[in-house]
Amino acid sequence: MIDLDVVIVGAGLSGVGAAVHLQKACPEKIYAILESRDAIGGTWDLYRYPGIRSDSDMHTLGYAFKPWRSDTAIADGPAIRDYVRETAAEHGVDRHVRFGHRLERADWSTEEACWRLFVARSDGRGPETIRCRFLVLCSGYYSYDRPYRPHFEGEESFEGPMFHPQHWPETLDHRDQRIVVIGSGATAMTLVPALAEKAAHVTMLQRSPTYVIARPARDRLANGLRKLLGERLAYRITRFKNVQIQRLFYRRTRTAPEKVKASLLKRVRDRLGDDYVEKHFTPSYDPWDQRLCLLPDGDLFDAIEAGRASVVTDRIDCITKRGIRLESGEELAADLIVVATGLRLQLLGGATFSVDGEQVDFSKTWTYKGLMHSGVPNLIQTFGYVNASWTLRADLTADYTGRLLHHMDRLGMRQCTPRLRPEDRDMPARPWIEGFSAGYMQRAMPDLPRQGDRMPWRNPQDPVVDRKMIRDAPIEDGALVFGNPAPSRAE
């Protein structure tokens, strides 16, 4: 049996950041990181499709404590992976990672004041049991093994490769191929211009349009400030500036959606013309009801204008031997089909949890500040933003974890559990994330925790509100209950 103070699950962007924060705030704590794969990097190590990149600028997707040094603000996957690994090595976090360790079950015991973790190992040595006093989940928000992959009628007859980009074949050569990419989300819009550089032609086949916005891949102001002020101060200024721009833009989509829509469509119309925009780039929903797709330097527009790529808006009737037949009757010839249909949301890493022998149904819990769950002790879950950079919230969550552990030590208490106060028991139940209609989120919403209409039972998805609620508010608020005192030495 292995005994630890803290276990962090996941060695990706969030997990490495959580470990750095933990080491700084609580250097006396003994911890380990469980990583189911054999490498550090999470998403940025898993995804290997052509053109893989961030859809957030690295001055906000990067860590608060580690400046992003590259001139390119919209970074590719390998650069982000290197940034995460460099961070782990600089802070000695890599020495705490247990690779090939997948958390399958976690059982909390109030009597022992600890979690008992049942971990599967990929090295053939059999399962392992670990005890820890606090559990921090940084395992991301989607299944690494099972993407969302609908079945299409007739797809078994297709004579070429057909796969989801999450499972991109390492040896695939797409040179001079006619490619159809099914989907219109960030992955599809990243793939199309990248594939178009070598393919005969790439068609993005979408059921409905998505909002897009073109931005320079390089932040000229950030690069100029770095030369004048040095990397750390320039990074802080740029991060603050970009967070405010993101927040103000998102708020504008809530208060004046029609004006924002008109502005976004005008930018596309200036590049592609009226007909193309009306049919292929005018969504039926308001901006930021689903995530906007970022086009660095307008790369998708360039590919369309050059004739190397095109967009088709239609529904699939069936897959044929040599392509796709659409409901309109049109047929798209294809040598290769990429099914970029999105993610399968999976919180908590797919593990099961119990508290004192009773299995936890997280759909019946209330979210506490978007990072803990009512009735579940000593557990923090990292989940970022759907309308801003993920790491902004991951940093806040990691900082809160350190403060909470310190507070428990000062009190001499081994357990903290969010519980509804008497005045909270009549709260209306709201979806865990509101105002976001993306399919991957809506498919999973019935299984997710609820949020209420008052603090601290909210998940605001707003960096400024979250800073007040998570970083600046006192730890003790009447809803987070401390107990299970540590036994005295005499005992």
Image (spheres, rainbow, N blue to C red):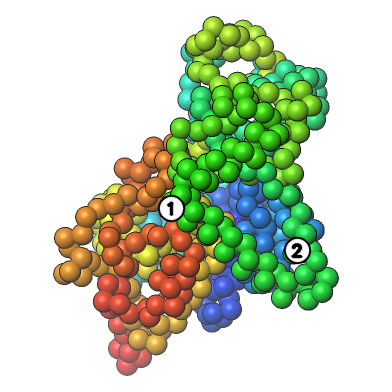
Where does label 2 land, which residue?
A: 221
Residue ID at (35%, 44%)? 445
Q: Is residue 191 above or below residue 182?
A: below
User: On the rendered image, what quadrant is the N terminus found in?
Assistant: bottom left
| Distance of label 2 from label 1 (alpha carbons) | 28 Å
Pick out the residue farthest to the bottom: 490
- Give the amino acid at mark 1: Thr
Measuring from the top left, give residue 322's x and y in whole percent.
65, 9
Q: Secondary structure at mark 2?
A: helix
Residue 123 appears anywhere in the view: no
Q: Is residue 385 left or right of residue 416?
A: right
Total number of numbered discs in the rendering = 2
Return the mark for residue 459: none
Q: Quadrant of residue 313?
A: top right
Q: Is residue 201 above or below residue 185?
A: above
User: On the rendered image, what quadrant is the C terminus found in?
Assistant: bottom left
Measuring from the top left, give residue 473's x and y in whole percent.
39, 77
Dot 1 alpha-carbon crowd within 10 angstroms: few under 14, some 14 to 19, many 20 or more:
few
- Give the amino acid at mark 2: Leu
Return the mark for residue 255: 1
Residue ID at (62%, 58%)? 61
